[in-house]
């Protein structure tokens, strides 16, 4: 199995742009789709990005996803940061039939 | 509207078993897989397995194989996750979630505390 490594925490000011990375330890990041989940304190997670870059309905256009084969990583970018974006973010991908989560990144909107 | 409603919090002794329910409504039950994900206190998300309510074989994460059983009841549109030989490391919030192209609806979570 591979691992997905995320930064433990990131912080940025309201209105700015932040990018959270998710690096796959082995095998190509392009092998399987990457999903991103947002989890606010005390709440169940919700999906903000699926299939690398697709957004569920209701997710603001400020959220975008991408993959980079050269760095073997996926990224979640949030532009125009708002206080309500403060949450934990998890990437997730697949290894055959198994699912793998990244360790999560705590986003603080200062 | 789609809803996934999980059973209430439980306290278990080490070595005991637990069985959590995830009652679904608002959609065709057998048409969607259900994922189980857990989260230990202050920790990240951990995938446990996938239940196939249409009757197909579930898929379990290797870590839980032999200790977890996922079943479904089409008469009540409910999915169950049972886990045996509990230890303190199984103390966590357990979530069920419906899979379409992504996990689009989640249950509210069930806190299971394993303590002597």
Image (spheres, helix red, strand yellow):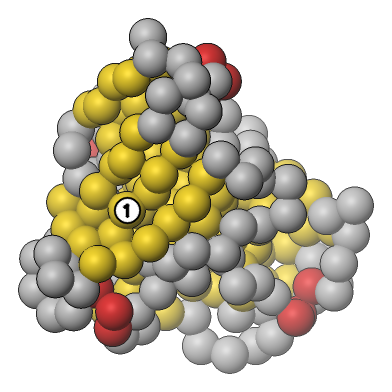
* In the rendered image, the vertical position of residue A100 relative to residue B95, given as above or below: below
For disc 1, the neighbor class at 10 Å (few under 14, some 14 to 19, many from 20) is many
- Identify the chain of the residue marked 1, using the numbered disc in the image: A
Q: How many marks?
A: 1
The quadrant in which the C terminus of chain B is found is top left
User: Residue A68, position in %: x, y?
Assistant: 24, 67
**In the current view of this chain or complex, which residue is farthest to the top?**
A110
Please say whether residue B15 is visible from this viewpoint. no
Front position in the image: A85 or B88: A85
Q: Is residue A99 left or right of residue B82?
A: left
User: Residue B95, position in %: x, y?
Assistant: 53, 47
Indicate the secondary structure of the residue bearing disc 1: strand
Q: Which residue is mark 1?
A: A75
Q: Is residue B9 left or right of residue B54?
A: left
Give me the residue at 90% from left, 52% from top.
B1
User: Residue A6, position in %: x, y?
Assistant: 20, 45
* In the rendered image, the vertical position of residue A44 relative to residue B4, given as above or below: above
Give me the residue at 16% from left, 51% from top.
A5
Toward which corner of the image does residue A108 lie, by quadrant? top left
**In the current view of this chain or complex, which residue is farthest to the bottom?**
B56
């Amino acid at each position: 199995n591979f691992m997905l490594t995320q930064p433990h925490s990131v912080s940025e000011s309201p209105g700015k742009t932040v990018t959270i990375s998710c690096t796959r330890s082995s095998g190509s990041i392009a092998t399987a789709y990457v999903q991103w989940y947002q989890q606010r304190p005390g709440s169940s997670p919700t999906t903000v990005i699926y299939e690398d870059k697709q957004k569920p309905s209701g997710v603001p256009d400020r959220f975008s996803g991408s993959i980079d084969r050269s760095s073997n990583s996926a990224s979640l970018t949030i532009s125009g940061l708002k206080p309500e974006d403060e949450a934990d973010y998890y990437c997730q991908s697949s290894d055959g039939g198994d699912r793998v989560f990244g360790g999560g990144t705590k986003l603080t909107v200062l | 509207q789609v809803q996934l409603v999980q059973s209430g919090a439980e306290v278990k002794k080490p070595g005991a078993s637990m069985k959590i329910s995830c009652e679904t409504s608002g959609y065709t039950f057998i048409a969607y897989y259900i994922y189980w994900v857990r989260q230990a206190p202050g920790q990240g998300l951990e995938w446990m397995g996938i239940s196939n309510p249409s009757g197909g074989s579930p898929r379990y994460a290797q870590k839980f194989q032999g200790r977890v059983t996922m079943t479904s009841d089409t008469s009540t549109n409910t999915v169950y996750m049972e886990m045996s030989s509990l230890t303190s490391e199984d103390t966590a919030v357990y979530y069920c979630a419906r899979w379409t192209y992504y996990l689009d609806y989640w249950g509210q979570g069930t806190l299971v505390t394993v303590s002597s």
